[in-house]
Amino acid sequence: MSTLHTLSINPSSLHSIQSFIDIMGETDELLLLANGVYGALVDAKINIPLEQLRDSGKLYALKDDLLARGIPASAPKRATLISYEGFVDLVVKHQNTYNWV
Amino acid sequence: MSTLHTLSINPSSLHSIQSFIDIMGETDELLLLANGVYGALVDAKINIPLEQLRDSGKLYALKDDLLARGIPASAPKRATLISYEGFVDLVVKHQNTYNWV
Amino acid sequence: MQKKLLFISHKTPYGSFAAKETLDAALASAAFGQDISLLFKGDGVYQLLPQQNSSLLKRKSIGAILGALELYEVNKVFICEQSLLSRGLENIKPLIKVHVLNNLSLQVLFSEQDHILSF
Amino acid sequence: MQKKLLFISHKTPYGSFAAKETLDAALASAAFGQDISLLFKGDGVYQLLPQQNSSLLKRKSIGAILGALELYEVNKVFICEQSLLSRGLENIKPLIKVHVLNNLSLQVLFSEQDHILSF
Amino acid sequence: MGLFLFITQVMIFSVSILSAPYTDQAAFSAYKFVEAALSKKHEVRRIFFYGEGVLNANHLNTPPQDEINLYEAWKELASSHQVELIVCIASALRRGVLDEDEAKRYEKDGHSMQAPFILSGLGQLMDAAIESDRLITFGS
Amino acid sequence: MGLFLFITQVMIFSVSILSAPYTDQAAFSAYKFVEAALSKKHEVRRIFFYGEGVLNANHLNTPPQDEINLYEAWKELASSHQVELIVCIASALRRGVLDEDEAKRYEKDGHSMQAPFILSGLGQLMDAAIESDRLITFGS
């Protein structure tokens, strides 16, 4: 059974984003939402741990939350942009949802 | 004019504790209180930036907040323990107080 | 119907009331006969430091609530090894009996649950 | 009596209402004739990203409030260089005119104040 | 020639909310999520307000008119889609969210909560966990 | 033979509180700080509750009996030491902290604030900054 991980705080306040990534299972995925979408910014050193998920197709970002904050258009390179309906589909796809704190 | 810096959140949630230390002036001091007292734990990698202040006599911790959380007795090596009255005296000593966020 | 529920406690004991309210929820679900596990992760590991004295904050002791876990027969109590290591707490003697889990074991724990409740 | 007040804004624009309430306080003190400076530090630098669209969150635009700073003749608006660098934002074109300050300049700014208001 | 049958997987959701409507974006995110789930014909059985989340149920909240009023939005969900709005009573007392009965019991002047929000215990969170296919937490 | 004069530097303090009494330790820390300042004969002129800090002024807060009741503690400070308790009105409306007048103005059933807490504007924070030797912020 797999888990959908969500990040809803800015990763720059997460000392240990790596510690969350380290416990993601093979089929788990990660959704960035709310302040978590700053994790989609490519050039921030603090986001390097998230690079591991890039191109794996396992990283999503909520489109509205991204656009609301003026995140540059380069961001989508690192994550698949989805709507709230897409969020619902991800929750259906995975048995569990784990909100990173 | 000098500034008293206070840290009232756990430094492990501070990406950039170094960025606060870097702007401390010559005569500035730092007080750890509330969850900030976890910064007095000697062995935590995350607290390494605070090591710079050790032995400089510029690092204080609020005794009640430390004891309430069960911080091991080795902690005082890194900081001068003070009471709330001592906190008041520090505020009088410095023109400004800056609460790290 | 019994479900497998994992409660994850991420917060310091006295910064907010999250630590207390997480344990309250875990104890309630144990009382309701669910198959529960409890994991201390991140800053939640500070809850297990011995010799806390919450009366200095005029607060209820987290230790007292932790003690109730055994009464409710909550035995699957875990702590994240990496969270201990990064906080320099690998040598503490925890307030209650906990099983230290490495990353791989945590992955297994997660994959076995019906629901994860994250606080 | 005029005092030198430094307002420091540390929070993201729409996570909470802290960004808005910091600017409200700075504008109010400017209206009261105080000598104010405003510094964006830490996550506060995200407030200056261009092309925000707060209507998606059904919130007031931080950009609109930032625009009012000029009307109130708040000209001492600063941004922390290190906060920009660590977030990979050194090449953005900020929403309003800000002076980028390195660590030494920040030390000087702090030392000149009567009070620091940290949000 | 066959019968083509389009099957959508319809699930029962419950949601737990741990943040006040103004402290972070979590309560807003939860609201938008629930709206989307309902639009996709899922059932949203219960919203459980816990910890700081109970502050969503304060009917005295008066946000500016040009911003979303989450209190009204929750109420509207309850009436249009029979979503249960359950507020943890222990969390609520600590945070000053009291209906008329509790205000009377604690001899308080005034009150801050009313129907369709309902004060109840943690058993309602357990019921939601047991009865729902998915339980999602927003906030911290 | 001389006259020995012991001079204590007595100052005027004001305090700004940005956190609810239950979200972090900041409001408790502020209370203990103010107590200590008064015990050292300093004057504490004003406490300004801003942002989430306005939730300290909610008289419906009902913490368990074996924990400190910060609402009562603030009230006691006001009556014993003439400390002004000012609540930012814009912050308070958003967060459902309304006195009887505001509740009436917004046609709300019930209210959640009363004297000695006083609703006022940001000008009171500026006055505190001007009149005080030290202005200390607790919370975020």
Image (spheres, coloured by chain):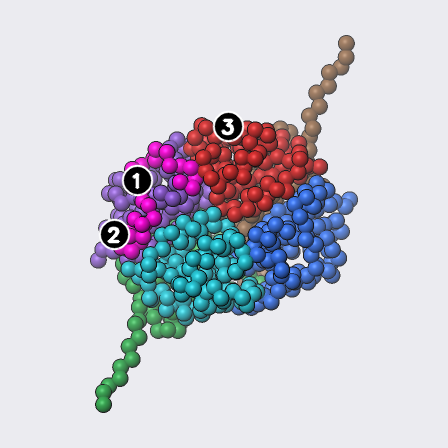
Chain colours: A red, B cyan, C blue, D purple, E brown, F green
**Same chain for the residues at labels 3 and 1, yes or no?**
no
Left or right: where C34 falls relative to A92: right
Q: Amino acid at mark 3?
A: Lys
Q: Which residues are magenta?
A: D85-112
Q: Write down the residue under mark 3.
A: A77
| Residue count near mark 1 (Cα–Cα under 10 Å), binned few <14, some 14–19, many ≥20 | some
Q: Amino acid at mark 1?
A: Val
SS at badge 3: helix
Q: Is residue D66 above or below residue F120?
A: above
Q: Of the numbered discs in the image, which one, if any, rests on residue D34?
A: 2
Q: Is residue E68 above or below residue F71?
A: above
* Residue extending furthest toward the top: E1
Name the front one of labels 3 and 1: 3
| Residue count near mark 3 (Cα–Cα under 10 Å), binned few <14, some 14–19, many ≥20 | few
Answer whether residue D95 is magenta in the image: yes
Between the C-alphas of marks 2 and 1, the distance is 19 Å
Q: Chain of mark 1?
A: D
Q: Write down the residue under mark 1.
A: D98
Q: Is residue D58 above or below residue E118?
A: above
Between the C-alphas of marks 3 and 1, the distance is 29 Å
Q: Residue at x 45, y 54 (%)?
A: B49
Q: Chain of mark 2?
A: D
Q: Residue at x 26, y 84 (%)?
A: F4
The one nearer the camera, F58 or C81, is C81
x and y percentages locating residue C83 in the rendered image: 60, 51
Left or right: where E20 falls relative to D118: right
Q: Amino acid at mark 2?
A: Gln
